[in-house]
Image: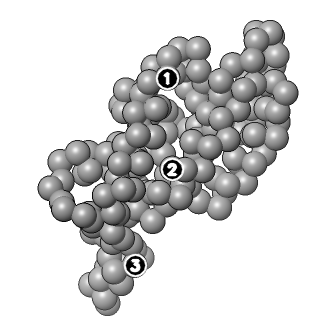
C-alpha cells in the first residue's frame, strides 16, 4: 500500500519545468541575491531565512512569528524612510493569505515589491511548497543536464521518497 501511495505521490508531483521557466526562476534568484542590506525580505520562519541566506542574499531578513509583525511595522515607521520590502511567505494557500495581509499592512509604510513572490509562486508552486525548498530547486537546476525540459519532484518538507501516512 505504501508503495502505491508513493507512486501516486511521485506521479502527481513530478512536473516538468521548461527551459524558459528555468531561466525565469534563475533570474528571480539572481534578483534576490542582488539585494543589499537596505532591502528587507519578510519570511514566515527561521528555515525560510536560512534558505534565502544560503542562496546568497545580503538583504535583511525579518522572520514573522506570531505577533512579531507589529514590531516590524513600528520599526519601519521609526526609520522614517521607505524601505524596499519583498514579502516571501510559503507558496500554499496560507502563504497567499499572509501575503495579502502583510502587503496591505505595509502600504504607505514601505516600498513593497508586489511581483517577485507572485512570479516565484507561478513558476515553482508545483515543485516547491515553501521558501526553504528554493535552494534545493536551484541546486537541481544548476547541476542538471537537460535539453528543453527538466523533471523535478516536489521539494520541501515532503519528498516522493518520504512516507505519506
Residue positioned 70% across, 32% down in the render: 112
- Dot 1 lies on which element? loop
On screen, 80 above or below 135?
Answer: above
Give residue 66's position: percent from left, percent from top. Answer: 71, 39
Q: Neighbour class for label 2 at 10 Å: few (<14), some, many (≥20)?
A: some
Residue positioned 36% across, 31% down in the render: 54
Find disc 2 in the rendering and name its residue: 120
User: Which mark, by number, is residue 35?
Assistant: 1
Give residue 35's position: percent from left, percent from top. Answer: 49, 23
Residue furthest to the left: 145
Marks 1 and 2 sit apart, C-alpha to C-alpha, by 16 Å
Q: Neighbour class for label 3 at 10 Å: few (<14), some, many (≥20)?
A: few
Find disc 3 in the rendering and name its residue: 12
Residue positioned 65% across, 35% down in the render: 113
Give residue 78's position: percent from left, percent from top. Answer: 80, 10
- Dot 3 lies on which element? helix
Residue positioned 65% across, 61% down in the render: 93
Q: Earlier in the sequence, mark 2 or mark 3?
A: 3
Amino acid at each position: 500500500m505504501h508503495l502505491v501511495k508513493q507512486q501516486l505521490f511521485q506521479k502527481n508531483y513530478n512536473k516538468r519545468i521548461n527551459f524558459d521557466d528555468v531561466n525565469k526562476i534563475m533570474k528571480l534568484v539572481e534578483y534576490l541575491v542582488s539585494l543589499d542590506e537596505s532591502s528587507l525580505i519578510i519570511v514566515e520562519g527561521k528555515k525560510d531565512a536560512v534558505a534565502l541566506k544560503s542562496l546568497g542574499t545580503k538583504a535583511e531578513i525579518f522572520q514573522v512569528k506570531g505577533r512579531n509583525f507589529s514590531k516590524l511595522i513600528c520599526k519601519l515607521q521609526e526609520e522614517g524612510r521607505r524601505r524596499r520590502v519583498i514579502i516571501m511567505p510559503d507558496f500554499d494557500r496560507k502563504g497567499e493569505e499572509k501575503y495579502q495581509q502583510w502587503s496591505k499592512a505595509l502600504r504607505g509604510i514601505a516600498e513593497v515589491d508586489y511581483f517577485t513572490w507572485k512570479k516565484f509562486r507561478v513558476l515553482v508552486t508545483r515543485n516547491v511548497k515553501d521558501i526553504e525548498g528554493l535552494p534545493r530547486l536551484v541546486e537541481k537546476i544548476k547541476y542538471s543536464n537537460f535539453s528543453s525540459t527538466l523533471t523535478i519532484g516536489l521539494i520541501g518538507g515532503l519528498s516522493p521518497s518520504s512516507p505519506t501516512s
